[in-house]
Image: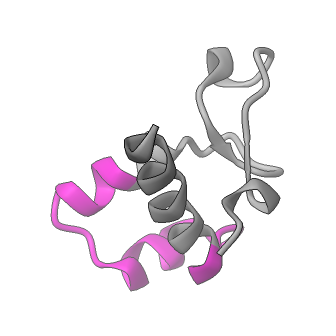
Amino acid sequence: MNHKDRISIDPRIRSGKPCILGTRIAVADVFDYLGGGMMKEEILDDFPDLTAEDIRACFAFAADRERR
């Protein structure tokens, strides 16, 4: 998966935190929800603008950052 199609970094949005494109939902927010025990389906229900591909892009983004 190419996370660059779904994750953007814009200094005007959330102080430049990596966010899901077209939203103000940060990659870190998604991981905070998952780390807090929410299931992917619960996140998608709570945030109808998100898709399963967006959540996978968060993982791809994090993996890419870890490799660097």
- Which quadrant of the figure contains the N terminus? bottom right
Identified at 62% across, 69% down, the residue is 54
In front of the other: 63 or 47: 63
- Above or below, 30 relative to 65: below
Left or right: 68 in relation to 47: left
Identified at 55% across, 41% down, the residue is 26
Left or right: 52 in relation to 28: right
- Above or below, 65 relative to 15: below
In front of the other: 64 or 7: 64
- Secondary structure mostly seen in magenta is helix
- Above or below, 67 relative to 15: below
In front of the other: 38 or 58: 58
Residue 4 is situated, as x and y percent measured from the top left of the image, at: 75, 54
Residue 37 is situated, as x and y percent measured from the top left of the image, at: 16, 66
Identified at 65% across, 69% down, the residue is 50
- How was this image coloured? one colour
Q: Which residues are magenta?
A: 31-53
- Above or below, 35 relative to 14: below
Residue 60 is situated, as x and y percent measured from the top left of the image, at: 52, 63
Give the quadrant of residue 42. Answer: bottom left
Give the quadrant of residue 48. Answer: bottom right
Identified at 71% across, 67% down, the residue is 2
Left or right: 17 in relation to 28: right
**Tag count in the figure?**
0
Q: Is residue 19 magenta?
A: no
Residue 17 is situated, as x and y percent measured from the top left of the image, at: 59, 27
Q: Is residue 34 magenta?
A: yes
